Every structure is written in C-alpha cells, then in structure tokens.
Image (cartoon, helix red, strand yellow):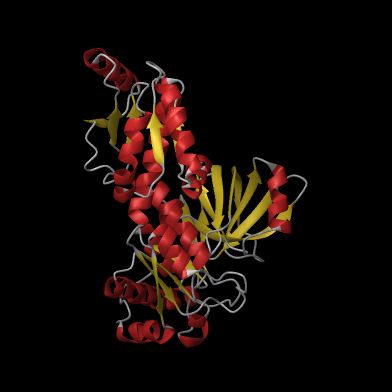
Amino acid sequence: MKAHIYTLTSQLHDRQAVDTTTLEFLSSLNIEYELCHDHFDDYGSHALDLIYVRTGGTEGIFRQLLPQLQEQSTRPFFLLTSGKSNSLAASMEILSFLRQHGISGEILHGSTAYISRRIQLLGQVSEARNKLSGSKLGVVGKPSDWLISSAADAGMVKRKLGIELKEIEMPELLTTIAETPLPTAEYEAPTEGIRNALPGAWQIYHALRKMVDRHALKGLTIRCFDLLSEVHNTGCIALAQLNSEGIVAGCEGDVPAMLSMVIANALTGMPGFQANPSSIDPETGQMVFAHCTIPLCMVQRYELDTHFESGIGVGIRGYMQEGPVTIFKISGDLSRHFIAEGTLIRNEAKPDLCRTQQVIQLSDPSQAQYFLTNPIGNHHIILPGKHQDALEEMMTL
C-alpha cells in the first residue's frame, strides 16, 4: 500500500535543508510512498493520505487549507512529523484546533519503527474501508426467528460503511434452486444418507452462486433453516464454498454476523468462522465455539456429517490449525463491538454439538464475562491469527 504524503512548510525555513531532511526521514520509515509536496488538489483520493508537517509556522497555512481539505475528504487528518524544525509543536497546535472544531485527527510521531507500523496499520484499514464502500450484501429471507437481538440498521450501515443491505425474499432462492439442475457427479461420503444428500447440497451452492451474480452481491446471509423443510437439505456446504471463493456467506440470516465477517474479510482476506459459544468457563476463560459449517479455505482438513439439529442434509466438521485466533463481533447499528484474542488449543468432534467445534483459550480470561453479562447476540466470528489492533483501528475510524 502506497501512502500519499502532502507537505506543509513555512517560508521562513531553508527549503533545500528541509527537503534534505524530508528525504532522510521518509527513507528511514521503510514504507512505500509518493511525495506530493504542497499541492493538495487530489488530497483525499487515495487509500491513505498523510500531511507531513515539516516545520513550525505552518499552523496558519493549514487553517487556510482546511475548508478545501474538508470538501475533498471526510476522513480523519493524520499529521506526520519528524520532530525537527518545530514540526511537532506545529502539529500539536493544528490537532488542538481540529479537536476544538470537532474534527478527528492524530499525530504520527515517535520512533521510525513505531511510525512505520502505524502507517502500515492505517493503510491496511483504509484499504479495507475502500473495499467495503459501495458493496452490496444480500439478506436472503428474514433473520431466523430466534435471533431476537440481531437486527441491523441499514441506514447506519450505509452511512458508516458504505454498504447496501439488499433484502431478497426466500421464494426467489427456492425458485432458483428448483431451476438449477442437480449435479451428476459421484461423491465420496461416510454414509449412504450423506452421499444421497450431497447433490442437493451442491445444487443449493449453484443456486446461491446464481443469485450472487444476479444481484451483484459481495456477500450474503441466508435464513438457512427454512431449507430443511423446503428442500430437505442444508446450506452448510454452499456457505463453506462461497466463503472460500471470497464471497462472504453467513448463516441464519444473522446480519450483524455477516457484517462482522465482511469487515474481517476486508481487513485480513479471511471471512471467519461464524459460530455459537457452546460453553464458557468464566474463571479460566476457556470456551467452546461450534457450528455446522466453516469456510473450507480456513481448515487443514474436514469431514462430512449430517446437520446437527436436524440430522439431515450435510454438515461440515472442519479442523483449523491450532494457534492464535481473534474473536470479533459488531452490533447491527455499529454502536458496539467486541474483540478478543486467544489460542485455539484443540478441535473436537463431540456428537452433541454442531459439527465444527473449537476449544479456545482467551488471552485475557476476564473477557469471558462479556459473553455472560453483555454479549452482542450469540454468533461470533473466529479468525486465525492476531488481528485485534487492525480491528480496533477499523472500529475507531
């Protein structure tokens, strides 16, 4: 990711000396950048735009520029400073002025290693927000009846994330399934019942893929339990495959869970595992998460089983690599979020839970209380790796 760096320079300082200091400083950051100097005509048009306050005496220059910059961008102002030539002092005065007027911003100052990490993180988040803006997500059928706290504010989602939520009636999916030929391939399966269910499970995938193309969707969530009664099958394989293709696909019509997956995917390239907390030890912070599908791209291997609650169709028991994980959830009105890091210590295959089961040890055991006192619904998203900093930055912005 290339940062575009615009400069503020006082006329009182020696321009040649300032230019020399600028090149030395920017080279030390070890980042990819384009230096735009004092010309702000295309400010706000890139994934990450920084204002390098090179000297003191630039506060008035910035104040005169501010109306133009606000017309061109609604993002926070990131003020880069080397600390030389009174640049930090000027940056503090500028940021104080911004805060007085209710405008957000931040000074990027410190060691070169810190500034470099901060710029890379801001770039990652800016690119993710660009990916989200203008995208369309489908809500196929209403949220499942038991998701009584998992509504979404479509207007807020559009304003804050630039995402359109498109409601699609369940009959459209059922009609598309009926019009989609059953695959004729021969499938390997552990039982005859699962083998017989596999063509129908893949038929659901092909039907959903048609709907993704028809509505130009970047992702969807589906009221999947209706499929049990309507087509006597499950969407578990379809969602696992769609997620592996980069099309975020969530279960049970849970819109906040889908939004959490979309945000995670934009930041990390992975959609995440939508799962229910099944048991919690509030003293140790050890938890079990389970669901009957998981993106195939997230697992080392998987097995086919029936769907847990119904005992019909096809569910997936996936085995993810043990190691660091991040748990994430955002509320439907975007007012709250939860982020916790932990360790996947083992995968399990107990017969009395949804098929994919993960035992996770929270890094901070006290965070287990959130699930028991103030949870954001039941579904949460599990991501391999440590992503708390990026997710927190995304939520802050």
The percent coordinates of residue 48 (x first, y second) are 33, 40
Q: Residue furthest right?
A: 283
In the image, is residue 137 above or below residue 356?
below
Residue at position x 37%, y 64% from top?
A: 242
Judged left or right of residue 341, residue 194 is: left
Up the image or down, 364 lies above or below 83; here it is below
In the rendered image, the vertical position of residue 376 relative to residue 120, given as above or below: below
Estimate the x, y position of residue 357 in percent, counting from the top left: 59, 57
Specify whether 34 is left or right of 238: left
Give the image location of residue 32, x and y in percent: 28, 30
Q: Give the quarter of the image for residue 76.
A: top left
Going 23% across and 17% down the picture, which residue do you hit? 15
Question: What residue is at 48 percent from the left and 73 percent from the top?
Answer: 194
* Nearer to the camera, 109 or 298: 109
Asked if one can make out residue 240 in the rendered structure from this viewpoint, the answer is no
The quadrant in which the N terminus is found is: top left
Q: Is residue 340 at least partly visible in the picture?
A: yes
Left or right: 51 in relation to 281: left
Q: Is residue 206 left or right of residue 319?
A: left
* Nearest to the observer: residue 186 or residue 254: 254
Q: Position of residue 211 (x, y in %)?
A: 32, 75
Q: How many marks?
A: 0
**Residue plotted at (61% across, 47% down):** 346
